[in-house]
Image: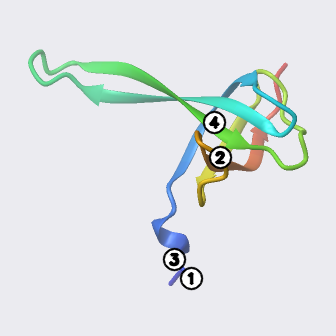
């Protein structure tokens, strides 16, 4: 059992598409959802701003982001780990 509310934090995996500032990155998360009328799977993408404390993310990196307290107007996630480096 997770302690201190860890289990309620949303974890997402996506690709870094922009380095927005000194310690900020924009991560694009893709998901497959069922179309309500046509019953086919459709790819959807959404962008999230995330806090990169060590500024080690690069464009194209596959990263895991975790929900946290609001860090600025648009940043509600932080980079937990870099899963795969860009080629």
Q: Do the residues labelled 1 and 3 touch (CB within 8 Å)?
A: yes
- Which residue does the numbered mark 2 point to in the structure image? 72
- Residue at the spot 60% in from the left edge and 59% down from the top edge: 68
Instruction: Judge the density around disc 1: few (<14), some (14-19), many (≥20) Cα neighbours within 10 Å.
Output: few
Q: Where is residue 69 in the image (x, y as percent from the top left)?
A: 59, 60
Q: Do the residues labelled 4 and 2 touch (CB within 8 Å)?
A: yes
Front of the two marks 1 and 2: 2
- Which residue does the numbered mark 3 point to in the structure image? 5
For marks 4 and 3, the one nearer the N-term is: 3
- Residue at the spot 90% in from the left edge and 39% down from the top edge: 56
> Which quadrant is home to the C terminus?
top right
- Which residue does the numbered mark 1 point to in the structure image? 4
Residue 19: quadrant of the picture: top right
Residue 20: quadrant of the picture: top right
Residue most toward the front?
Answer: 73
Image position of 14 (left or right of 80): left
Tag 2, which secondary structure? loop
- Residue at the spot 58% in from the left edge and 39% down from the top edge: 74
- In depth, the one of 49 and 3 nearer the eye is 49
- Residue at the spot 90% in from the left edge and 47% down from the top edge: 54
Q: Do the residues labelled 1 and 2 touch (CB within 8 Å)?
A: no
Q: Which colour scheme is used?
A: rainbow
Tag 1, which secondary structure? loop
Q: Where is residue 80 in the image (x, y as percent from the top left)?
A: 72, 53
Estimate the spatial distance between the alpha carbons at disc 4 and disc 3, rounded to whole Å: 22 Å
Q: Where is residue 27 in the image (x, y as percent from the top left)?
A: 64, 31
- In depth, the one of 19 and 30 nearer the eye is 19
Question: Which label number is shown at residue 49?
Answer: 4
């Amino acid at each position: 059992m997770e302690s201190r509310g860890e289990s309620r934090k949303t974890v997402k995996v996506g690709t870094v598409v922009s380095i927005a500032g000194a310690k900020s990155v924009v991560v694009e998360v893709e998901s497959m959802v069922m179309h309500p009328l046509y019953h086919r799977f459709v790819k959807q993408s959404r962008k999230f701003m995330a806090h990169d404390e060590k500024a080690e993310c690069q464009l194209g990196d596959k990263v895991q982001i975790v929900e946290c307290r609001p860090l600025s107007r648009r940043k509600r996630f932080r980079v937990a780990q870099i899963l795969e480096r860009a080629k």
